[in-house]
Amino acid sequence: MKRYIKTIYLVIFALGMFLSCSEEDITKLPVTALSEDAFWTSEEEVSQAANALYFSLDNVGQIEWDALTEIMFSQSGASIQISTGGIGPGASLVNSLWTGQYATIRDANWFLDNVDKAELSESAVAKYKGQVRFFRAWAHYKLLYQFGNVPLVDRVLGVDEGQVEPSSRATVLSFVLSELDQTITELSGYTPEYGRVSRWAAMALKSRILLYEGTLAADNSMLTESASLANQIMGGGFGLHDNYTELFRPEGEGNSEIILARVNADLPGRHHSLGQWLGPISFHASWSIFTPTMALVERYPDINGEDISTSLIYDENNPFDNRDPRLNQSIFNWDEDVNYEGSMFVNNGTWLNFRKWINPDETAEQRSHNDWIVFRLGEVMLNYVEAMNEVNGPSQELLDMINDLRTRGGLGAGVGGADIAVPPIAFAGLTKDSFRDIIRRERIIELAAEGILYYDYHRWRWLESTMNQPAVGVVPLENRVFTAPRDYTWPIPDFELINNPNLTQNTGY
């Protein structure tokens, strides 16, 4: 594992700091760096140090993780290497995940080891500790989920302490959940502005983790706790946004569905290229780096919620007609050129293209400003429904939540912004197994291109079947390879095995 140096690295660290807690300033970098001796003398400096951790919050690049599932095709070398079976100790995505998360852990430990020097009030320091603890917990979880047994590091290490023994997966998970409990407590009296970690975000992360782990371990106690946390969030004043398309465009920023977002405000230096990554060449000479597959298109049911393989109204010659409205809001019809609110999207003949996340009002190349949604109510509702179905089976309450998401998908989705009526799925005849199929399909189509479906496919153990099939757009695109069970646990990077002889390579690599 990378050596943690307890030394004066604040000049480097300060390059990652935001200046203050306002929505505008959260997007700006400081113009000066401070020495270690001069730091920790005021709340402003504590705030600057805590703000630095927000650079590790998921951003638009997270979308690439969906390319490790059947729903997305990638032209990025990092994900192609994994999806085509080239995973190994030197794979770039493997290395970046490992180094990135331990860098976050290092910075969080530096903060938590030093913040009490500032002598702030108990409530003031708690809100900063809670935010930073959130990042440390999540970084550890990302590591344990992909690598299994990993070094648990909860303090800044000295020069001679870098060769840390790995902790068991169970030990690291226990630490993560305990950290999130403390985070929720520390942030319980803190109501932050948009873009900052709150107790609700910590609860959403813990609910997600418990759903993942409860599925993997078939542990009903974890699933019950996941549902309990989700239920608390659903009662916390959040609400589904009334337009699915708008939710992922700048005009939807700050709406009541968003629990936590990575702020990408329209300020100098804060743009990104998501529109060009997703759009066809007709949109600012876009690159179609990440595109949907036919496997995703086929997941969307007909308007009545019936799978297209058994639907009586599905027409393969008009595949976008009579479908769940979220299909047309997420993917452009490859059979025709589309005038999307004044921007032309021309069929490129090879790939499908996402409509989700694209802002037709963009006026220049590589100038997207969408905030990246990290947690939202739609996911939390699905956490609750899935966990409760696994514990108790289907109920009308759970089905109503699925139908609420389906109904919302039709709002404003018609011609000229008219609503599309989406008939509810009926409860009669549902079993735990058949409802599970509906829930999993709902997660895929509701959360597509949000960068978290890899974790679902991983915990459902779907990767060995779906990722040993060719990726297909309008034409076949890529032959994919997944070796089970080996590829469910990633290899430890080669350089870490050299640096730390206490680490041993995971099985099969």
Image: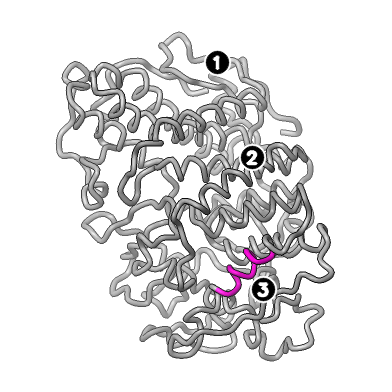
The earlier-in-sequence mark between 3 and 2 is: 2
Q: Quadrant of the C terminus?
A: top right
Q: How many marks?
A: 3
Q: Check if residue 401 falls in the magenta segment.
A: yes
Camera-side residue of 296 and 2:
296
Residue 12 figure quarter: top left
Q: Which element carries disc 3, helix, strand or loop?
A: loop
Look at 23% across and 27% down and name the residue there: 11
Other-residue count near label 2 (Cα within 10 Å), few / some / many at <14 / 14–19 / ≥20: some
In this view, the mark in front (3 or 2)? 2
Residue 300, numbered label: 3
Q: Nearer the viewer, mark 1 or mark 3?
A: 3
Residue 502 picture location, percent across and down = 62, 15
Which residue is tagged 1? 164
Please state which amino acid type lies under the numbered disc 1.
Answer: Val
Residue type at numbered disc 2: Glu
**What span is in magenta?**
399-407
Of circles 1 and 2, the one toward us is 2
Q: Sequence-wise, which precedes: disc 1 or disc 2?
A: 1
Q: Which secondary structure lies at badge 1?
A: loop
